[in-house]
Amino acid sequence: MRSKKEIQLLGALEAAACSHGFDLVELEQTGSGRSTLLRIYLDKPDGLTLDDVASANSWVAEVVEALDPYKGSYTLEVSSPGIDRPVRTLGHFEKAVGEEAVITLESAGVFQDASDKDEKPRLKYTGKILTVNTEEQIITLEAEGARYPLRFADIKKARIKGRFDFEGQKG
C-alpha cells in the first residue's frame, strides 16, 4: 500500500511527466533518513535517450522539492525502466499483453478459474499476460498451464520479466 506522500508525489510527477512528453512508469522509495533513495522511472513512446534522462532530472527535482516529501536529505535517481520494467497502471498492463510478468499481490485472496479450486491462493505469480479487461479491471495471467484472473486492485507490484533474444547473433 502506498503512503499518502507517495500518492501525492505520484500525482504531481504524473502530471509533470505528461506535460514534458514522458510516461511516469513507477516511483520507488527505499531506505530511510539520510539513506533514502527516491527512484523515478520514466519512458517515452520511442524509448529514452541519455539526453532525455538528463533533461528530465531538472523538472523531476523541481516537482519533488516543491512537495518536500522527505525530512532531511535524500538521493534522487531518474532512470529508464530497463528490461525488467515495472508495470503500474492498466495502460501499462495493456501494453504488456503477451509478455511474461512477475506479479505480487497484496494478499493471497485471489480468485481463480473453476479448474484451479484445489490450488492454494498465493502471493506471487509468474506467467504470460493474456488479457486486460479495463472495464472490470481484471488482468488474466497464464501460468503453469492455468489461467488466473487477477484483480488490478489486488496487485501490489508487477514487473515484466526481461529476456534477451540472442537468436541469429554471431558469437
Image (tube, rainbow, N blue to C red):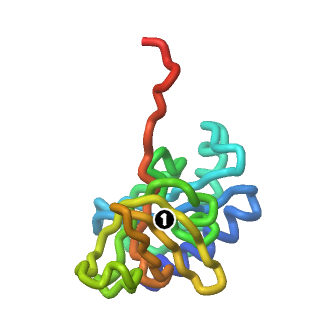
Q: Which residue is mark 1?
A: 27
Number of numbered discs overlaid on the protein picture: 1
Q: Quadrant of residue 122?
A: bottom left
Closer to the camera in the image, 159 or 146: 146
Tell me the quarter of the picture where residue 150 sits: bottom left
Q: Position of residue 103 (x, y in %)?
A: 39, 67
Image coordinates for residue 107, horizontal then vertical, percent: 31, 84
User: Considering depth in this image, is 15 or 59 the residue closer to the camera?
Assistant: 15
Residue 4 to residue 85: above or below? below
Amino acid marked by disc 1: Leu
Where 151 sits versus 15, above or below? below
Between 53 and 1, the one lying in front of the other is 1
Quarter of the image with the C terminus in it: top left
Quarter residue 16 falls in:
bottom right
What residue is drawn where x is 35% and y is 70%? 104
Residue 101 image offset from top left, x and y in percent: 43, 58
Q: Residue furthest top?
A: 171
What SS does tag 1 mark? strand
Horizontal placement of 95 versus 122: left or right? right
Residue name at image x 67 percent, y 62 percent: 17
Whether residue 76 is visible, yes or no, is no
